[in-house]
Amino acid sequence: MYHVLTATKYSVGEIVGMIEIRYSDECSFSTFTNEKYIFEMIKTDKFKASSAMLFDDFKIYSKEKLYLKNVGNYFGSIYSSD
């Protein structure tokens, strides 16, 4: 319901690459701005801590503020996991 776009690349039955664009209308997000969320995800370990609970051997290669035309600023990351 909250996925705007998901694309996955498989090789020999394993996921080797994926991109997801998601949004949330969760009411807790109304307590801070998108800019604050992006800042927190980039400058703290909150993204790593929450993702490491879901994935084994979670590694982050990049975290950055990006811009998507007609959507606006967003938090982007490149990571790997088992």
Image (cartoon, helix red, strand yellow):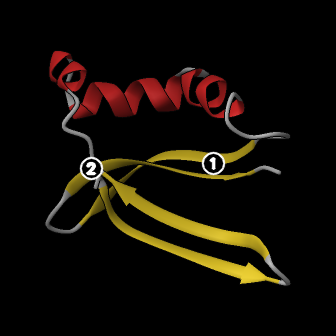
- Nearer-the-camera pick, 79 or 81: 81
Q: Which residue is mark 2?
A: 73
> Does label 2 or label 1 sit earlier along the sequence?
1
Q: Secondary structure at mark 2?
A: strand
Q: Is 76 drawn above or below residue 43 in the view shown?
A: below
Q: Which residue is mark 1?
A: 62
Residue at horizontal 61 percent and vertical 22 percent from the top: 45
**In the picture, residue 59 is in which quadrant?**
top right
Q: Is 8 drawn above or below residue 58 in the view shown?
A: below
Residue at horizontal 15 percent and vertical 22 percent from the top: 30
| Amino acid type, mark 2 | Asn
Residue 17: % across, % down: 67, 71
Residue 75: % across, % down: 41, 45
Residue at horizontal 59 percent and vertical 26 percent from the top: 50
- Nearer-the-camera pick, 28 or 38: 28
Q: In the drawing, what numbered circle is on residue 3?
A: none
Quadrant of the image containing the N terminus: bottom left
Left/right placement of residue 24 relative to residue 47 reads left
| Residue farthest bottom in this picture | 12
Disc 2: CA contacts within 10 A as few (<14), some (14-19) or many (>=20): some
